[in-house]
Every structure is written in C-alpha cells, then in structure tokens.
C-alpha cells in the first residue's frame, strides 16, 4: 500500500522488536517493554516535522546558537485500554507532553466502537495530537477517536499504531482527509473475528496479562 499519508517505520531494529512482539511465547513483561520501545521509535518519525526555534546556549567553551522545539506542548491521546502501553515510550522521548484519554470498546457482535470515557487537556484545540493504539484493525475505534478530537477543535492529528490492517488504514484515511498514520507494519487482512492476520493477538490482554 502506497500513500503519502501513511508512514511505515521499518528500521531494522523496529522489525527485530516487532518479530519478538508477535511471538505468542513473549511474556506480558517483555511484551510491555517491546510496545514501549516501538512507540519511542515511532515517536521519532511522527515528530520529525516539529517546528524548531533558535536558542542561545553557553557550552563549557563558548556561547552558541542551537535549536529547540517551538510552540505548545504536544498531547498524547491513547485509546483505552491498549493505547496506554504506548504512552510511556513516547513520554521518554517527549517528557513534557500532556496526556488525554479516550475510552472506546468494540461491540463483540457488530465490531462497532462505542465511547465510554473522555478526559482531555482544556487547551487541546491549540495543540498537535498523537492518537495511539497498538492495533489498527477495522479502523472503527481510531475513526471515532479522531472524529471526537476534530469536534474538540484539534487541527493536527497523527495516528500512531504498531500493526495495521489494510482495511483499517483505508477506513481512517477515507473518514478524515488530513490525518497521518504511522505504523511498524501493514499486515495481510482481518479474520472473521476482526483480528489482524498475522497480527499479534489481543494487544490489551498481552500488555496487562488478561484474557
């Protein structure tokens, strides 16, 4: 799949860690660590276009002009609950970011998303937002989350996932003309239960050790 709004972060170390993430024998502890590490790798790419400004710094040798990120702090918005696993990795990269939360659950019969919780910074309409969720399957939850943020006035939204299905990508791009998607892999398809194939199973269960 080729699209200027989709970035596949395929660094060799990303591919290496993703293979471990997929392995059904990987423990919850190691799975959480891998999710955190992959989120940080993706964060580098998703923030590549941040605006910079000049700042004067005095080194042990002399004064010099350096660059620092300009503008307001970014907001990370995990889609609950699995998205929580990606927050720490992004905050290691950007410690001063704010974090909002959107709770979505998928109806087991219709696979349609339903919002059950929302808590966002008051100033979110003035900030760039990273929506994070390990899996982009049908695209329903991501589309609903993005639509909610648009209604809140957010103009710049990037969706950061670890694994995506083609139908999920198509759904998100069709629903929103401006959102950009970052993923470590685009997998083959969805199965009859709307799980990504080959995927990595239920990311929330594997992060939190539940079934």
Image (cartoon, grey):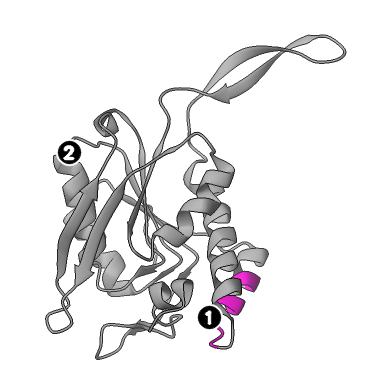
Residue 22: which disc?
Answer: 1
Can residue 132 be seen here? The reply is yes
Q: Residue at left 52%, top 40%?
A: 48
The residue pinned by badge 2 equals 152
Q: Is residue 28 magenta?
A: no
Q: Residue at left 57%, top 64%?
A: 10
For the stretch drawn in magenta, what is the main secondary structure?
helix
Q: Is residue 19 magenta?
A: yes
- Residue 30 locus on image (x, y percent): 61, 73
SS category of the residue bearing label 1: helix
Span highlighted in magenta in the image:
16-24
- Compare marks 2 and 1 and give the one earlier in the sequence: 1
Q: With respect to residue 114, does 175 lie above or below?
A: above
SS category of the residue bearing label 2: loop
Q: Contact, CB < 8 Å: mark 2 with mark 1? A: no
Q: CA distance from mark 2 to mark 1?
A: 35 Å
Q: Residue at left 48%, top 70%?
A: 185
Q: Residues within 10 Å of mark 2 (few under 14, many from 20)?
A: some
């Amino acid at each position: 799949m080729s699209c200027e709004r989709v970035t596949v972060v395929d660094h060799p170390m990303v591919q290496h860690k993703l293979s471990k993430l997929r392995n059904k024998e990987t423990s919850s502890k190691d799975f959480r660590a891998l999710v955190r590490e992959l989120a940080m790798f993706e964060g580098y790419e998703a923030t590549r276009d941040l605006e910079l400004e000049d700042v004067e710094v005095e080194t042990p040798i002399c004064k010099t002009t350096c660059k620092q990120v300009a503008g307001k702090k970014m907001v990370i918005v995990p889609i609950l609950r699995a998205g929580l696993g990606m927050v720490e990795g992004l905050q290691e990269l950007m410690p001063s970011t704010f974090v909002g939360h959107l709770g979505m659950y998928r109806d087991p019969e219709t696979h349609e998303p339903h919002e059950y919780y929302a808590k966002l910074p008051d100033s979110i309409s003035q900030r760039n937002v990273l929506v994070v969720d390990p899996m982009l399957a049908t695209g329903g939850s991501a589309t609903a989350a993005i639509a909610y943020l648009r209604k809140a006035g957010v103009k710049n939204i990037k969706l950061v996932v670890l694994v995506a299905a083609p139908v999920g990508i198509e759904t998100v791009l069709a629903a929103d003309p401006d959102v950009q998607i970052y993923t470590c892999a685009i997998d083959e398809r969805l199965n009859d239960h709307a799980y990504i194939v080959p995927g990595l199973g239920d990311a929330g269960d594997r992060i939190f050790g539940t079934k």
